[in-house]
Amino acid sequence: MKRFKFTLDKLKDYKDQVLSKEKNELAQLRSSQQKAFSEKEELEERLRLSGQEFNEKSSRGMSIMEITVFKGFHNALIDQIRLKEKEIAEFDKKIEKQLGVVVQISKDVNSLEKLRDKQLEEYNFKVQKSEEQFIEEYVSGVAFRRT
């Protein structure tokens, strides 16, 4: 009997490639989100340190110009932090969407694997029946020749 060949092998290979590509894209999105989160934390740390510096200098006395510069810097940092928060929220949406794509393709691949397993089971059953029939014919032939 001929070797087992899954009839949808090419489709499964294609789906595996697509799944791999989509997983890579998901990993890239997560990496970019983590980078944006780290940048946001750095901005928050700069804001905290600048706030400390402002408090120290203001306790010793500051000119109106220095206060204006500090406040402008603080406002710029706060704006950058808000932008990073929006960017992170956008990554959340993109990741959620991409996760849905990966889950769907994974389901497709799993269903193809189950179909392959079912076809292999049927193939093995046919092989077993064929072998049993061969053995019966062989035993019948041997018994017939003895008589």
Image (cartoon, grey):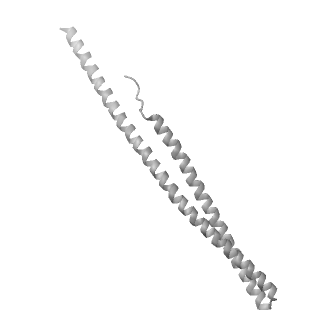
Q: Residue at x 60, y 68 (%)?
A: 86
Q: Quadrant of residue 108?
A: top left
Looking at the rendering, in which quadrant would you find the N terminus? top left
Counting labels gives 0
Residue at the far left in the pictured view: 147
Compared with residue 19, is residue 37 higher up or lower down, i.e. above or below?
below
- Whether 95 is drawn above or below 133: the answer is below
Residue name at image x 37 percent, y 39 percent: 115
Q: Quadrant of the C terminus?
A: top left
Q: Quadrant of residue 138?
A: top left
Q: Is residue 132 above or below residue 101?
A: above
Name the foreground residue: 107 vs 60: 107
Q: Position of residue 39 (x, y in %)?
A: 67, 67
Q: Which of the pair 57/79 is nearer the observer?
A: 79
Q: Report the side of 19 relative to 137 (left or right).
A: right
In this rendering, the answer to whether 136 lies above or below 105 is: above
Looking at the picture, how far across and down is residue 113, in whole percent? 41, 41
Name the residue: 77% across, 85% down. Answer: 67
> In x, y percent, where is residue 133?
26, 21
Residue 24 vs residue 3: left or right?
right
Name the spot of residue 100 as percent of width and height, x first: 47, 55
Q: Is residue 79 left or right of residue 121?
A: right
Residue placed most toward the observer, 113 or 82: 82
Q: Quadrant of residue 29?
A: bottom right
